[in-house]
Amino acid sequence: MATARLSAATCGLSAVAVGALLVGCSASVNVEKAEPKLSADKLSTTVAEKLAATTGRPKPDITCPDDLTGKVGTTTRCTLTADDGSTLGVTVTVSSVDGGRINFDIKADDKASPAPN
């Protein structure tokens, strides 16, 4: 089972048109494989849960198209889609790996993209 932790001291929040935005947040997840890897679906869920827990709002719609490999420095891009259809890019970067635990930082882009017409 995957678990995640969030350090309030490493999290900052800003409000943008798409709602609350996660900046400089950290999380970690346990995975049980020889080469730690977190599936795109589990990564999407974990990022959404961290955002919801930090902001006190419902889980946002987060989509991560790629798995996250447990190698320091590895990054993947996810997308937060707001209720109005606007989107915000989110970068997930592996900060450390401890056995089967992948620790990663979550940083949202500074600007949202408007909803398609």
Image: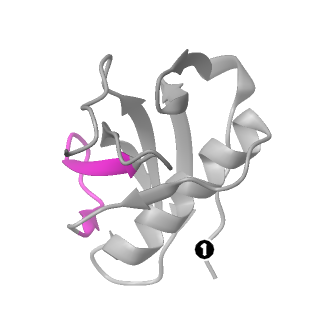
Q: Is residue 38 above or below residue 16?
A: below
Where, quadrant-wise, is the C terminus in this rendering?
top left
Q: Is residue 96 above or below residue 31?
A: above
Where, quadrant-wise, is the N terminus in this rendering?
bottom right
Measured as percent of width and height from the top left, residue 114 is found at 26, 32
Tell me if 84 is positioned left or right of 79 in this view: right
Kindly indicate the quadrant of the structure image that contains residue 44: bottom left
Asked whether 75 falls inside the magenta stretch, the response is yes
Query: Which residue lies under the disc numbered 1?
Result: 2
Measured as percent of width and height from the top left, residue 95 is found at 37, 38
Amino acid at dot 1: Ala
Q: Residue furthest front?
A: 117
Front-most of 111 and 5? 111
Seen at 31% across and 27% down, the residue is: 112
Seen at 47% across and 83% down, the residue is: 32
Tell me if 114 is positioned left or right of 100 in this view: left
Q: In the rendered image, is residue 85 in sight?
A: yes
Front-most of 57 and 54? 57
Question: Which segment did they paint magenta?
Answer: 67-80
Question: How dense is the environment of label 1, judged by Cα within 10 Å: few (below 14), some, or many (20 and up)?
Answer: few
Asked whether 7 falls inside the magenta stretch, the response is no
